[in-house]
Image (cartoon, coloured by chain):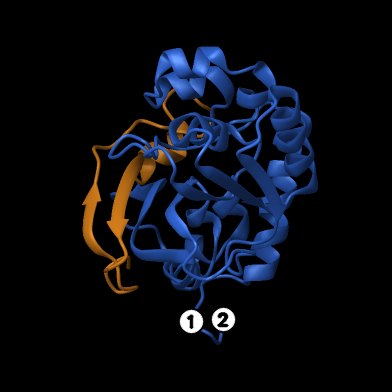
Chain colours: A blue, B orange
């Protein structure tokens, strides 16, 4: 890649779309990662909060950690979720920020957006909205967010510096980024890093 | 990379065995892949 990236960002994006489109349509399918309520329990989410959510809010959850483990959201905060998927973290965030707060989930997959929007409507939530977009070019106003959250999504972007630049743009001064993602303890061979299939399998 | 992007007061939580008992576990073990929580602030 001439721009210093390991893989073609657009090709990787299409692979990621295909993977998470499948999860949206068939959340109980066979994947290389856990999904749903068992995953939320494994990652240490508040069991009472998760139990109160309908299955449609949890079953397509495919995060890798708990973005609320180092800090919780405060009532009234405005939150942006990068790669909101089926909306699970947005629904958890919705409860934390309350009616005076607001949560915007960003996702690029029509199937995930359809799922999350339908669930929000069924739950009667007025403080959650889902927008279509990519996290390298967020459909969010400058300096409008108190908090940006994300879960297992940034690692799937080829240009992470651009993502963090976008997070910096949309956060208010003093705002915070609290997210969960994977990291490797052993070095991954360069050849593997340039293999798009290995990014999503 | 967070600090290079301008974030401050970066904190990282303990590792979580995200892929344990999943079909991706063997590959995750090979490269010691775990999930982590991160917290970072935009300067005031």
Give how far across and how far down residue A35 sits, in percent.
57, 27
Callout 1: helix, strand or loop?
loop
Q: What is the chain letter for disc 2? A: A
Quarter of the figure with residue A74: top left
- Asked if residue A28 shows in the view, the reply is no
The residue at the point 41 percent across, 22 percent down is A42
Q: Left of B30 or right of it: where is B44?
A: left
Residue A4: assigned label? 1
Give how far across and how far down residue A159 sits, in percent.
51, 70
Badge 2 density bin: few <14, some 14–19, many ≥20, Cα 10 Å: few
Question: Height in image: B20 above or below A199?
Answer: above
**Residue tagged by mark 2?**
A1
Q: Left of B17 or right of it: where is A142?
A: right
Question: Height in image: A151 above or below A174?
Answer: above
Which quarter shows the N terminus of chain A? bottom right
The residue at the point 32 percent across, 68 percent down is B1
Callout 2: helix, strand or loop?
loop
Q: Nearer the viewer, residue A126 or A21?
A: A126
């Amino acid at each position: 890649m001439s721009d210093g990236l390991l893989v073609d960002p657009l090709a990787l994006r299409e692979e990621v779309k295909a993977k998470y489109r499948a999860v949206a349509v068939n959340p109980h399918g066979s994947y290389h990662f856990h999904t749903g309520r068992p995953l939320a329990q494994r990652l240490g989410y508040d069991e009472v909060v998760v139990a109160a959510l309908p299955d449609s809010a949890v079953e397509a959850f495919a995060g890798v950690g708990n973005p609320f483990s180092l800090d919780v959201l405060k009532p009234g905060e405005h939150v942006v979720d990068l790669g909101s998927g089926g909306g699970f973290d947005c629904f958890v965030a919705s409860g934390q920020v309350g009616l005076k707060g607001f949560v915007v989930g960003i996702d690029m997959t029509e199937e995930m957006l359809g799922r999350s929007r339908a669930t929000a409507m069924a739950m009667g939530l007025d403080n959650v909205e889902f927008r279509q977009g990519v996290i390298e070019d967020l459909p969010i106003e400058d300096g409008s967010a108190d908090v940006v959250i994300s879960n297992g999504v940034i690692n799937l972007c080829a240009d992470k510096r651009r993502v963090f630049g976008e997070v910096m743009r949309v956060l208010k001064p003093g705002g915070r980024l609290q997210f969960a993602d994977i990291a490797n303890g052993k070095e991954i061979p360069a050849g593997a890093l340039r293999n798009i299939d290995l990014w999503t399998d | 990379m967070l600090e290079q992007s301008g974030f401050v007061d970066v904190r990282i939580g303990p590792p979580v065995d995200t892929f344990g008992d999943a079909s991706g576990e063997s590959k995750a073990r090979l490269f010691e892949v775990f999930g982590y929580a991160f917290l970072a602030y935009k300067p005031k």
